[in-house]
């Protein structure tokens, strides 16, 4: 099993299908490519589970981070069954995320530097291609099956979903450079700049804010002992307070000034207030088990159906309080494990990357996002990365 995980050729084949460009599904001529990626992901997930069973057979235990994720997806699946929802969708999303977590968890444990190298290369290519699509088609790709002109479609993401992709990419670029070189090299800086430029050109205020926060945190981590003087637990408490403030700040003068004058956005967060209020009302009716996965979004508004555009609310809609509790447990375990690394710079990049991506998730509803769970997996595996960096430093010291 260890030899397979240490094979970069196998790992790259397993990683790529989890980062499928969203644009494929909206072009008729690319439906064959879309189906190829789906089948590729199925095969990759099967291999991931074989690796997991091999790990359990050898070690007689399940990797700790995988258990709360399994419970999280199980809660949503049970809710889907009870509400007679779209069970196929629940199974596909659940199996995909668990397989992805397995891949990253075992990859970081047995081949941390190789895993970060591959993630950096894959995301580097995707960020550059996505930036080219933004530059060439600022109004969005001319996809014949895409019918929402309000949110332009780009290579990797729809504009308002670019925040999660870009923040995760910036964090991976930084961690790979620190792990392999001990500092941020020119190539890493160029890729981070490409991500930032994409955020500004895509026109998503969420992407601009979260990506900028990630870069600012990265700057302080690299040039000072910022990471050693900050307790991430305090920041997560602040995050909870910000979430509560956001969903209750209707008609707030300060908020209106920030949104309208600084970000040039409507004070109602482009309709999110209505979606949040509608979601809260639905959650009150089914607080414990939610509504399960559905063939369409939950909230009827403006002649269509929409998500809640908030990760916490969407999780409550899909799986109720049980699903949210297991997600919080997953984050708490990952962050608690990262604190054992004595606030190394790699760990700080990952933890602050997780905070930045969760801030972005306050405006988005991608409950089964590979970017969010990727951050959580790296957070839980940061100890292995710090250990590899220490070994590299000792080896370099002996060589000199």
Image (tube, rainbow, N blue to C red):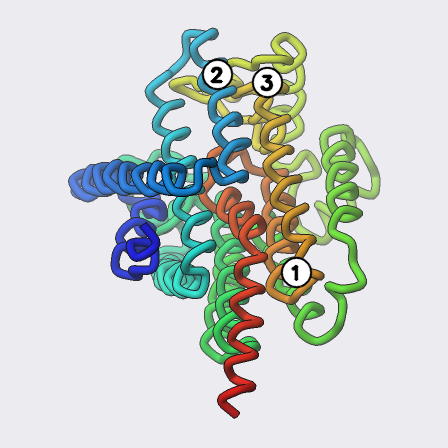
Q: Relative to 157, is 373 on the left or the right?
A: right
Q: Which residue is mark 1?
A: 348
The CA span between labels 3 and 2 is: 8 Å
Q: Relative to 79, is 348 on the left or the right?
A: right
Q: Which residue is mark 3?
A: 320
Residue 383 placement (x, y as % from top left): 58, 57
Q: Is residue 127 visible?
A: no
The reply to whether discs 3 and 1 touch (Cβ–Cβ < 8 Å) is: no
Residue 269 placement (x, y as % from top left): 65, 37
Mark 1 is surrounded, within 10 Å at the Cα level, by few (under 14), some (14 to 19) or many (20 or more) other residues, namely many
Secondary element type, mark 1: helix
Q: Does label 2 or label 1 sit earlier along the sequence?
A: 2
Mark 2 is surrounded, within 10 Å at the Cα level, by few (under 14), some (14 to 19) or many (20 or more) other residues, namely many
Residue 108 placement (x, y as % from top left): 46, 55
Mark number for residue 292? Answer: 2
Residue 139 placement (x, y as % from top left): 40, 50
Mark 3 is surrounded, within 10 Å at the Cα level, by few (under 14), some (14 to 19) or many (20 or more) other residues, namely many
The picture quadrant where one finds residue 360 is top right
Instruction: Out of 356 and 109, give the one closest to the viewer.
Output: 109
Q: Tell me the residue at 42%/57% (across/down).
A: 110
Q: Does label 3 or label 2 sit earlier along the sequence?
A: 2
The CA span between labels 2 and 1 is: 35 Å
Q: Tell me the residue at 39%/46% (across/down).
A: 103
Secondary element type, mark 2: loop
Disc 2 or disc 1, which is closer to the eye? 1
Instruction: Out of 241 and 277, give the one closest to the viewer.
Output: 241
Q: Is residue 340 visible?
A: yes
Figure check: 257 above or below 391: above
The picture quadrant where one finds residue 278 is top right
């Amino acid at each position: 099993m260890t030899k397979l995980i240490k094979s970069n050729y196998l790992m790259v084949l397993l990683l790529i299908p989890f980062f499928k460009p969203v644009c494929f599904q909206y072009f008729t001529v690319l439906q064959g490519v879309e189906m190829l990626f789906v089948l590729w992901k199925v095969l990759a997930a099967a291999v991931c589970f074989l690796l997991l069973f091999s790990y359990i057979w050898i070690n007689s235990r399940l990797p700790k981070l995988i258990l709360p994720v399994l419970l999280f997806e199980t809660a949503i699946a049970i809710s889907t069954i009870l509400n007679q929802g779209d069970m196929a969708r629940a199974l596909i999303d659940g199996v995909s995320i668990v397989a992805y977590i397995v891949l990253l968890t075992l990859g970081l444990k047995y081949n941390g530097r190789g895993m970060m190298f591959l993630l950096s290369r894959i995301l580097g290519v995707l960020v550059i291609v996505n930036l080219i699509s933004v530059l060439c088609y600022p109004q969005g790709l001319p996809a014949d099956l895409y019918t929402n002109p309000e949110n332009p479609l780009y290579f990797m993401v729809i504009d308002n979903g670019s925040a999660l992709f870009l923040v995760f990419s910036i964090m991976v670029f930084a961690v790979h450079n620190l792990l392999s070189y001990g500092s941020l090299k020119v190539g890493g800086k160029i890729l981070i700049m490409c991500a930032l430029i994409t955020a500004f050109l895509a026109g998503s205020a969420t992407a601009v804010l979260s990506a900028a926060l990630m870069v600012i945190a990265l700057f302080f981590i690299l040039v000072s002992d910022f990471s050693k003087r900050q307790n991430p637990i305090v920041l997560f408490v602040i995050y909870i307070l910000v979430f509560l403030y956001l969903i209750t700040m209707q008609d707030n003068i300060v908020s209106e000034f920030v949104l309208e004058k600084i970000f040039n956005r409507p004070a109602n967060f482009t309709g999110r207030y209505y979606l949040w209020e509608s979601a809260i009302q639905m959650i009150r009716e089914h607080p414990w088990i939610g509504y399960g996965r559905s063939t369409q979004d939950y909230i009827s508004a403006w002649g269509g159906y929409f998500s809640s555009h908030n990760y916490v609310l969407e999780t409550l809609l899909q799986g109720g309080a049980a699903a949210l509790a297991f997600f919080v447990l997953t984050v708490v375990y990952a962050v608690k494990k990262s604190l054992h690394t004595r606030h190394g710079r790699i760990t700080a990049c990952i933890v602050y990357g997780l905070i930045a991506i969760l801030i972005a998730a306050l405006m988005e509803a991608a409950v089964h996002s590979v970017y969010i769970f990727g951050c959580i997996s790296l957070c839980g595996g940061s100890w292995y990365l710090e250990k590899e960096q220490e070994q590299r430093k000792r080896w370099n010291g002996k060589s000199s």
